[in-house]
Structures are given as C-alpha cells and as structure tokens.
Image (cartoon, helix red, strand yellow):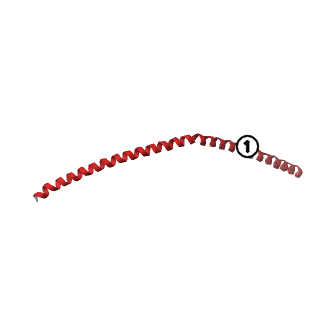
Amino acid sequence: MMFLDEFLPIVIYILLIVLIILLIVIAVKVIKAMNKVQIIVDNVNDKVESLNNFFHVIDGVSSKMNLLGDRFINFIVSIFNKIFKKKEKGKEDENE
C-alpha cells in the first residue's frame, strides 16, 4: 500500500505535466492557424474592396436605367390617358 501512496501521485504529476505541454503545443498551433486565417481574410477583403467600385458603377447604371424606364412608361401612360379622355369627352357631348 505504501508503494501505491508514493507511486500514484508521481504518475498523476507526470500526466499533468504531459497534459500541460500538449495544451501549450495545441495553443501554439491554433495561434499559427488563426494567423493564416487572418491573412486569407485580409486578402479576400482587399479583393472585395477592389470590386466595390465596379458594383457602385453597376448600381448607378441600374438606377439610371430604372429612371429612364419610369419616364418612358409615364409618357406612354399619359398618351393613353389623353386618348381615352378625348373619347370620353366626345361620348359625353353626343349624349347631351
């Protein structure tokens, strides 16, 4: 029994030391991996920012096309309104 009282704490301390060393190694590897991920994210962010101007131009062109389309549709609708109002006025004059 004396042997186990002296041997088990030594084994536990050795295992704790190994566990601490393994945790330190894993922490260092995680830090290196996070640095690599940060570099990749920065690279992707730079590429997205370079495309930002392109998307801004596309957005501007889309807005202009939308405005032009709305004006064209309003012009066509106003022509139809004028045509139908003249016909309605003509019909009202005939009824009187």
Q: Nearer the viewer, residue 18 or 95?
A: 18
User: Taking 10 as reference, is 39 left or right?
Assistant: right
- In the displayed orientation, state which residue is furthest to the bottom: 1
Question: Which quarter of the figure has residue 5?
Answer: bottom left
Give the labeled residue for mark 1.
Answer: 71
Q: Residue at x 40, y 45 (%)?
A: 34
Quadrant in which the N terminus appears? bottom left
Q: Position of residue 73 (x, y in %)?
A: 74, 46
Q: What's the residue type where badge 1 is placed?
A: Arg
The mark total stands at: 1
User: Taking 7 as reference, is 55 left or right?
Assistant: right
Question: Which quarter of the figure has residue 65?
Answer: top right
Q: Nearer the viewer, residue 37 or 83?
A: 37
Question: Which quarter of the figure has residue 38?
Answer: top left
Q: Position of residue 44 (x, y in %)?
A: 50, 44
User: Taking 78 as reference, is 37 left or right?
Assistant: left
Q: Nearer the viewer, residue 41 or 32?
A: 32
Q: Residue at x 63, y 40 (%)?
A: 57
Local SS, label 1: helix
User: Taking 42 as reference, is 30 left or right?
Assistant: left
Q: Residue at x 20, y 54 (%)?
A: 12
Q: Position of residue 84 (x, y in %)?
A: 82, 49
Q: Nearer the viewer, residue 49 or 74?
A: 49
- In the displayed orientation, state which residue is furthest to the left: 2
Q: Position of residue 3 (x, y in %)?
A: 12, 57
Q: Answer few, some or many: residues within 10 Å of disc 1's Cα (few below 14, many 20 plus, some between 14 and 19).
A: few
